[in-house]
């Protein structure tokens, strides 16, 4: 029907650029700056005109706008050598242009939505609360790609009484705007519940109950760690989340055996906490599944690759995160990645106030709490 075709798209500044070509592209030189093509995009109606290429071959140029409502995305230009377009052929080109315009409109709308959601999520995850000065913290958020649907990965740090800090990493199931909105809801609710100074597993119980009461709320996995540098202990509780890792001063790592509870929002409950000693020479690493999971790979193999990473001896929180991100090639992960690392800076307990013996996690409390 035609010997060559080109698609030119309009830019936001009013200019245009050639996005695609097919066929005998040499014939398109007659239409690059042809008045019909320009007037078609400006006027919103098809135009045709005879033109001549450099070697004297006559061609017929048919320029058809790409309309989407009141907006014209650009133009489709069809070129035919030596013969003009009949009415049926021109109608076919016009139909193809309208169909292409609809798909272009959908693609641009999707891209705009993804950009909005991506900016929203990055603003949320890039502004965690400030921990107490006795804790060194480093974090990273790595989206899966510039055009991937944004997910619900997030992290947070919350100051508690007596120099303690609550570290949080979570992942709302699914992608897109709904996941980002639910992520923000979980984060906001968590801040409110954590302000009551409950133990991590009790915080999860309240979060689960509140989320289960909202039928529109998506389930989410979550890991909480309450770090007390003055006493050298950390309390862990998880809701369907992967376990954290602890890197020693020599760079070696091990996983923390955290009791696995159901994801938040299921209403099942049953969360437990475990307490572990932690020293200033150790770095705690929390993360979402995008850091380690790879398609077709068993999760135990994935976690083994994590603990096999060896940061430099004596590395701080930032250096540990850098080593893990590089060692697991997280920049090219198939899913979004959120990483939160923490390293205690010990202070004399008298500077922070004594921890009451009856408080959860205080002296004399069991290693595992229910």
Image (spheres, rainbow, N blue to C red):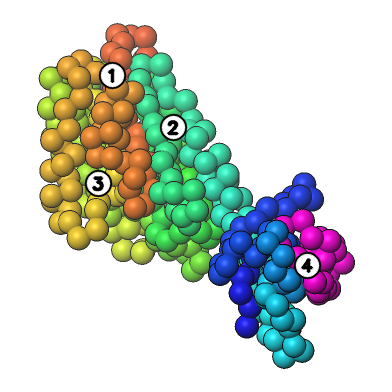
Q: Nearer the viewer, mark 2 or mark 1?
A: 1
Q: Quadrant of residue 306?
A: top left
First of labels 2, 1 by sequence position: 2
The residue segment tinted magenta is 32-53
Q: Where is residue 92 drawn, in percent x and y? A: 68, 85
Residue 48 visible in the picture: yes
Give the labeled residue for mark 4.
51
Which residue position holds label 3? 292
Q: On the rendered structure, is 202 left or right of 66?
A: left
User: Which of the two discs, 4 and 1, labels the residue nearer the N terminus?
Assistant: 4
Q: How far across and down, in percent of the image, does residue 4 sit?
A: 61, 70
Q: How far, Cα to Cα, is label 3 from label 4?
A: 59 Å
**Left or right of 159: which side holds 95?**
right
> In terms of sequence position, does the residue under pointer 3 or pointer 2 come before the other?
2
Q: Which marked residue is nearer to the observer: mark 3 or mark 2?
A: 3
Per the model, the C-alpha gap separating discs 3 and 2 is 25 Å
Task: Give me the C-alpha separation between circle 2 and circle 4.
Answer: 70 Å
Q: Which residue is mark 1?
A: 316
Nearer mark to the viewer, of 2 and 4: 4
Label 2, label 1: how far apart the Cα atoms are: 21 Å
- Name the side, left or right, on which 14 lies relative to 95: right
Is the residue 282 above or below the residue 361 in the image? above
Camera sees residue 202:
no
Camera-nearest label, 3 or 4: 4
């Amino acid at each position: 029907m035609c010997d060559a075709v080109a698609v030119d798209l309009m830019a936001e500044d009013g200019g245009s650029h050639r996005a695609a070509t097919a066929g005998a592209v040499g014939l398109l030189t007659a239409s690059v700056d042809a008045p019909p093509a320009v007037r078609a995009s400006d006027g919103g109606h098809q135009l045709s005109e005879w033109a001549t290429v450099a070697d004297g071959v006559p061609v017929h140029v048919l320029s058809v706008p790409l309309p989407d409502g009141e907006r014209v995305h650009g133009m489709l230009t069809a070129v035919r050598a030596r013969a003009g377009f009949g009415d049926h052929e021109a109608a076919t080109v016009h139909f193809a242009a309208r169909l292409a315009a609809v798909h272009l409109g959908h693609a641009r709308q999707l891209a705009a939505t993804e950009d909005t959601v991506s900016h929203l999520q990055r603003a949320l995850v890039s502004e965690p609360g400030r921990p107490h000065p006795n804790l060194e913290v480093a974090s990273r958020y790595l989206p899966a790609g510039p055009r991937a649907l944004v997910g619900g990965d997030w992290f947070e740090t919350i100051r508690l009484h007596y120099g303690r800090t609550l570290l949080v990493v979570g992942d709302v199931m699914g992608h897109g705007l709904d996941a980002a909105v639910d992520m923000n809801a979980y984060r906001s609710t968590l801040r409110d519940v954590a302000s009551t100074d409950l133990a991590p597993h009790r915080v999860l119980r309240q979060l689960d109950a509140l989320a289960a009461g909202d039928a529109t709320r998506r389930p989410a996995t979550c890991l909480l760690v309450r770090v007390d540098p003055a006493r050298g202990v950390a309390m862990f509780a998880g809701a369907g989340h992967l376990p954290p890792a602890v890197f020693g001063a020599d760079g070696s790592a091990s996983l923390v055996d955290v009791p696995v509870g159901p994801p938040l929002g299921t209403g099942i409950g049953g969360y437990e906490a475990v307490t572990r000693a932690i020293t200033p020479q150790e770095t705690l690493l929390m993360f979402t599944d995008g850091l380690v999971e790879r398609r077709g790979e068993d999760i135990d193999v994935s976690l083994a690759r994590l603990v096999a990473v060896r940061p430099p001896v004596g590395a701080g929180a930032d250096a540990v995160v850098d080593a893990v991100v590089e060692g697991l090639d997280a920049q090219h992960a198939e899913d979004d990645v959120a990483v939160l690392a923490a390293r205690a800076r010990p202070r004399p307990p008298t500077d922070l106030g004594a921890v009451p013996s009856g408080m959860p996690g205080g002296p004399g409390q069991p290693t595992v709490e229910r």
